[in-house]
Amino acid sequence: MFGKRNTAALAVRPAEPAPAPEPAPKAAAPQPKLAVAAPPKAAPDTDNRLNDIKVGVFNALLDAVDLKELVKLPPDTVREELTDIISEIVNIKKFVLSAAEQQQLVGDICNDILGLGPLEPLLARDDIADIMVNGSNKVYIETGGRIILTDVKFRDNAQLMNICQRIVSAIGRRVDEASPICDARLADGSRVNVIVPPLAIDGAMLTIRKFKKDKLTLEKLVEFGSCAPVLAEVLKIIGNCRLNVLISGGTGSGKTTLLNCLTRYIDPGERVITCEDAAELQLQQPHVVRLETRPPNLEGVGAITMRDLVRNCLRMRPERIIVGEVRGPEAFDLLQAMNTGHDGSMGTVHANNPREALSRLENMIAMGGFQLPSRAVREQIAGAINLIVQTQRLRDGSRRITHVTEIVGTEGDVVTLQDLFTFEVSGEDRNGRLIGKFRYTGLRPKFYEQARHFGKERELATALEAAERELR
Ligand SMILES: Nc1ncnc2c1ncn2[C@@H]1O[C@H](COP(=O)(O)OP(=O)(O)OP(=O)(O)O)[C@@H](O)[C@H]1O
Ligand SMILES: [Mg+2]
């Protein structure tokens, strides 16, 4: 059925190192989420024996079957076919395998051919936030806020490179010496970065931010202790009342997640335009336009930057503009938009505290070549942004909203800030978990007037009264 299938050839093929599997033509397309549980840790000898058998079976399979044709079939059919062919190969070559080992072998080979090989079991797990592949022998994951080394390994560098190639070919790219860096996305929306030698010294490095199908909500954040219940109430009002909000935080601290949570409170009637490098936000409103930047093609041309998108979306009659991550000169355009009637715009920025978020914005504007005196930039920032919400991944791995800070105005050429809510760490328990408390400073928010304008004054007053009781 698949051209080459000729089991007679199986018996005579000498053993040799496994060539990497053919890249699937529908690169990275169907993401077969095999619910393969992590195999129990076998003794090293068993590991080696199984690996040798896998290499032998894989070679025989390459001889017997035209994989390019095979992968055009629906994944379930491919799996059935492969199960039959592999058991034929195992019989002919007289490999000794238990039923469980054979099942594992079939699973591993299907993962190799249809998906992302040894990464599939990790991709199938919903409790993993990031997968970090450091060369073929080390795969780390982030789960529960902690980074852990797994026992997942690739057969060799060629297999890892092949998988990287398969991922990036989905967006029409290649990674090799000439073009060693690439951002891509898996079919399920997970964000991927690939960097390969010679830039990556110890082999290909693959970083995957796993896409969470069931996005976190403010209720979940409260459940996790990332946010106090009354603070969540205030954040809902902030999301609804068309305030301009900057979410600031370190890498992986939960900025995009919080932005997504806040967007749930946007009125369904508003026209929202989102601009992202890799679409991660999932807005629930009916009237949303989603835009995504584009990297340059193989010849290095055709890039569409975040600035291009933000500028273009100003011509699309947006009511709110949401920028996934502000990292360059688009900061200027976003501030302009916030200052000129696109209230309720939001974005995230990499910074360790609210004050630093402001200086990051200033730097982005300065580096964009805008010849503006810093006082003018600061006035523009103070006029544009209402609030900075700071997220942080603390040293015990927990993620918290550590500041809700208002921009009050400018004094001389300094932007004045006032904290409304903070998170204060007071100690550590016996398991190394940080103990802390959310605090309300008791200040009356400047956005009170805006809440009144949107009919949320009562709700805000009730939330602040509760905050006064619970968080002072
Ligand atoms: N409060 C939270 N509690 C537990 N997990 C969280 C929390 N916030 C975010 N996460 C998880 O942490 C991971 C990183 O979150 P997110 O993508 O929002 O971070 P980020 O700050 O935007 O990262 P980056 O800097 O890479 O863009 C995701 O898997 C997300 O589901
Ligand atoms: Mg993010």
Image (cartoon, rainbow, N blue to C red):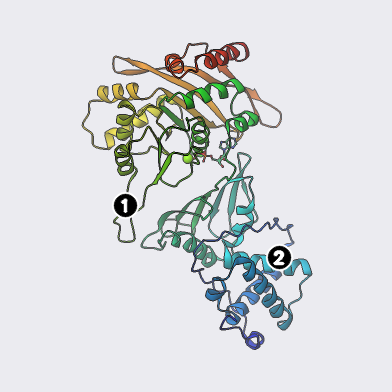
Q: Nearer the viewer, mark 2 or mark 1?
A: 1
Q: CA distance from mark 2 to mark 1?
A: 43 Å
**Residue marked by disc 1:** 303
Front-lying residue, 78 or 145 = 78
Q: Amino acid at mark 2?
A: Gln
Vertical arrangement, residue 351 with respect to residue 375, above or below: below
Could you tell me residue 443's position as x and y percent?
49, 11
The C terminus: image quadrant: top right
Q: Judge from the rendering whether residue 407 lies leftward or rightward of residue 312; answer left or right.
A: right
Splitting the image into 4 quarters, where does residue 168 fall?
bottom left
**Residue name at image x 43 percent, y 40 percent:** 288
Tell me the number on the disc at residue 104. 2
Question: Which type of secondary structure does the marked residue at label 1 adopt?
Answer: loop
Residue at the outermost right position: 98
Kind of residue sitting beneath label 1: Ala
Above or below, comparing residue 179 to residue 239 in the picture = below
